[in-house]
Image (cartoon, rainbow, N blue to C red):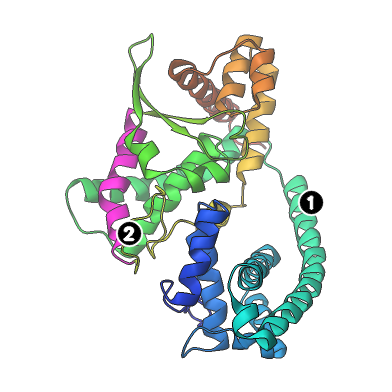
Amino acid sequence: MQISGLYQKHPLDCDLLAGFGKFLRDDNNIPNFKQEVANVSRFLFYMDSNKPSLDFVNNLEKSRSFFTKLADIGQKKQTIANYMKNLKRFLRYIIAITSLIQTDRALFEQCKHFLLCLNELQKSMSKQVSKEITGKRYTQMVTVAKTPHECWELLRVAKNEFLCIIGKAMNEESLLETEKLHVLYYLESLLMLKHLQRAGVVKNMTLDEWLSRKPCKLPDGENWTVIGVKKHKTATQQVATISLDEEEEAWFDVYYRHVRPAFLKNSDDTEEDETFFISTTGKPIYNPSNDLHRFHSKYNLPNITSQVARRVMETNTKASFTDQQKALVADYLAHTTATAEKHYRMKTPVNACLGMKLITKVATSDESNIETAGPSS
């Protein structure tokens, strides 16, 4: 998008956009409201690079071309649909919240007409999104990884380069932008493929949740660290728990102390964002699943999603674990409260760490079996 020019935007603190941001944050309680405002700002910049205005409602043809160009540069249908959704909410804000009906009745009516046209355009896009999702699920079904070993292939292949970069950072050496991005992608991949966390957990983990992490000593004397993430897919039932061993905790600390501050310098916002993982632009990461896909592509590996990794690991635990062990894994995967209650378990830091150890045991056991069997003839 940066190369195509579609990433350019107007300042988010201009009157037109600042009011919209306040509406999203205060009236709708949308935590990632800045991303939505930024998307609308990019659309407004495309329509008029001189100043943000509502004049776009008089140019439906050019407005449509914005979404066409997003498709031309390879943006997914879901991403384009999100832009439409954001623009619709912006128009609803203009129509229902501002005083436009009193100050400019003609423009008010034009905004209403544009919203109706956008609704029709979105209906067409929704059908394309459904086809895209169906195709994606089919591809995942026919190419699904059969073993935990395959799920962790990316982490093994990328690890040496990752450790070299971590070593440079620990020695206070400056990192290239590509090296910082490698650290970000590796940690995102680690959480989704090894720790089996949903993309929503990775995206919504906050800086405060990292700073509030708790040390946990296991019965065998091992030292672990536990992070609780409140906002995710099943957040209404359970807090997602991330259990890091000592080495992993050190990696996250390197990101926090060396990579994240460097990314923040690229942001034009005066306030530091509350999310833990941020992009090279200093903004919250937008789609961890896309980052995971890009990281697989870098090493020419088939893409393994977090959903596939979770399903493969669950299948393997069911085959060899006791009910108690299955319950520990289910708790770590942040299944619903009903699932946890079924096994009469309480989510505690120790249980979370034990659950992660069991998941690691499954994957490492699978690797041992592959090494023992050797190459197939």
Residue 158 highlighted magenta (yes or no)? no
- Part of the protein shown in magenta: 246-266
What whole-number distance in Å separates the C-alpha atoms at marks 1 and 2? 42 Å
Q: Is residue 122 above or below residue 160?
A: below
> Where residue 238 sits: x, y (%)?
57, 28
User: Few, some or many C-alpha atoms within 10 Å of disc 1 (few <14, some 14-19, many ≥20)?
Assistant: few
Q: Which mark is residue 271?
A: 2
Of marks 1 and 2, the one in the foreground: 2
| Residue that protrudes farthest toward the front in the picture | 102
Identify the image quadrant of residue 145. top right
Between 121 and 147, the residue placed more toward the observer is 121
Between 228 and 132, the residue placed more toward the observer is 228
Residue type highlighted by circle 1: Tyr
Residue type highlighted by circle 2: Glu
Q: Main secondary structure of the magenta part?
A: helix
| Res 296 seen here | no
- The residue carrying mark 1 is 138
